């Protein structure tokens, strides 16, 4: 599915191709949140993927759908962490070269995790990541695997929402963290492909409210800068390709304060025993902070769990 409307068949084919690669992560009920909100609340535990985040879905889908001759030359990605690790993990499994361009201020845990997969890492200022990756791709004949600006990446991310909607057919709302928009676009793709009426809601840091800006302008709008402890959600704009899905369906973006993100990380650990990174906790923060009040069963995607140990210790204290 590279052009036109998504189909259920294409989405289920992508899900089938992930068998034995990505985990069909469980939906865990959150009793404390369910009691507080008066509706069933479910958490999609993507931090239990092999690389600790949902990104493995899109990376595998995009890389394996490349023409074999291009893939054999090697792949390149730019990433704040989880996407780079996913592409490196996929490349190692397929036996191809991977070069990952990362922020020079990326958490050391995420940089070392990428290197541990055998990938080469180039560190640059985060605002120069894309340009640097494009230059290296052209110079070394590597195939780009973008973190969100790619139909096959979005299709792969959509398998997460497919599992949720298959498991809870009467779901009224689905909350997704928003970085560049790949995951929430995948949620929109899945809902459209299934003809499901679920409301798709975005959650983002107040210091990186690019979906809020896009919804207000009716198009992707670049912020001057972004900042948050949710280091995976810092693109300055949602992507044009994700927006082609998001703009047709999403009407609500919930902005989360830094304190709210910290409280969500703390709640998930102390109340649920779940280790979730700040970027993955914003969906729960939208419910804890009252930014979104669901009227029926709701699912929140916990997008990842790769958090710096020192930061995590401070957040849960």
Image: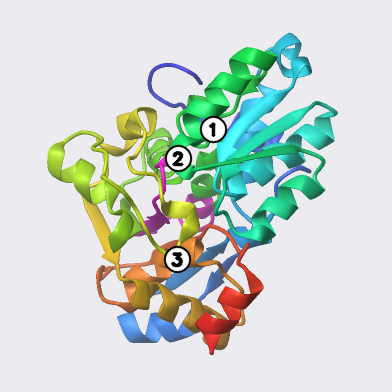
Q: Are marks 1 and 2 in contact (CB under 8 Å)?
A: yes
Magenta stretch: includes residue 172: yes
Query: Which residue is drawn at the image coordinates 64% and 14% (left, top)?
Result: 139
- Which residue is denoted by mark 3 in the rendering? 229
Q: Secondary structure at mark 2?
A: helix
Marks 1 and 2 sit apart, C-alpha to C-alpha, by 7 Å
Label disc, if present, on residue 131 of the rendered structure: none
Q: Residue at x 34, y 53 (%)?
A: 226
Q: Which of 175 and 294 lies nearest the eye of the viewer?
A: 175
Find residue 229 and report its horizontal and vertical position in percent.
Answer: 45, 66
Give left or right: position of 92 versus 247.
Answer: right
Dot placed on the residue nearer the N-terminal end, 2 or 3 = 2
* Magenta span includes 240: no
- Residue that numbered label 1 is attached to: 153
Q: Which residues are magenta?
A: 164-181
Q: Which residue is mark 2?
A: 182
Residue nearer the viewer, 5 or 130: 130
Q: Residue furthest top?
A: 69
Q: Position of residue 71 (x, y in %)?
A: 73, 18
Q: CA distance from mark 2 to mark 3?
A: 20 Å
Res. 219 image quadrant: top left
Q: Where does residue 8 sit, x and y in percent of width and height?
A: 49, 31
| Residue 216 vs residue 33, the one in the foreground | 216
Residue 183 position (above or below residue 298): above
Q: Against 109, is 115 above or below?
A: above
CA–CA distance in space, label 1 to label 3 = 25 Å
Q: Pointer 1: residues within 10 angstroms few (<14), some, or many (20+)?
A: many
Tell me which corner region of the image, top left, top right, bottom left or bottom right, holds residue 36. Answer: bottom left
Residue 234 in view (yes/no): yes
């Amino acid at each position: 599915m590279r052009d036109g409307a998504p189909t259920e068949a294409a989405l289920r084919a992508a899900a089938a191709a992930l068998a034995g690669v990505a985990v069909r992560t469980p939906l865990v009920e959150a009793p404390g949140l369910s009691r507080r909100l008066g509706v069933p609340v479910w958490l999609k535990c993507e931090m239990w993927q092999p690389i600790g985040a949902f990104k493995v879905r899109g990376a595998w889908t995009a890389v394996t759908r490349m023409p074999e001759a291009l893939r054999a030359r090697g792949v390149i990605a730019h990433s704040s962490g989880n996407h780079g690790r996913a592409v490196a993990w996929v490349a190692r499994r397929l036996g191809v070269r991977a070069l990952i361009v990362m922020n020079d201020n990326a958490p050391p845990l995420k940089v070392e995790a990428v290197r541990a997969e055998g990938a080469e890492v180039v560190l640059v200022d985060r605002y120069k990541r894309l340009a640097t990756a494009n230059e290296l791709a052209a110079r070394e004949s590597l195939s780009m695997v973008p973190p969100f600006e790619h139909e096959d990446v979005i299709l792969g991310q959509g398998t997460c929402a497919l599992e949720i909607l298959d498991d809870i057919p009467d779901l009224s709302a689905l909350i997704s963290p928003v970085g560049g928009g790949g995951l929430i676009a995948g949620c929109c793709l899945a809902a459209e492909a299934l003809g499901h009426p679920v409301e798709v809601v975005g959650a983002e840091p107040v210091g990186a409210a690019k979906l809020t800006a896009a919804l207000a302008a009716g198009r992707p709008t670049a912020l001057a800068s972004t900042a948050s402890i949710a280091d995976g959600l810092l693109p300055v704009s949602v992507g044009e390709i994700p927006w082609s899905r998001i703009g047709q369906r999403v009407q609500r973006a919930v902005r989360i304060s830094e304190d709210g993100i910290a409280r969500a990380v703390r709640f998930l650990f102390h109340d649920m025993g779940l280790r979730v990174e700040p970027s993955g906790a914003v969906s729960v923060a939208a419910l804890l902070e009252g930014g979104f009040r669901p009227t029926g069963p709701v699912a929140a995607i916990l997008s990842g769990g790769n958090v710096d140990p020192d930061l995590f210790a401070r957040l849960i204290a």
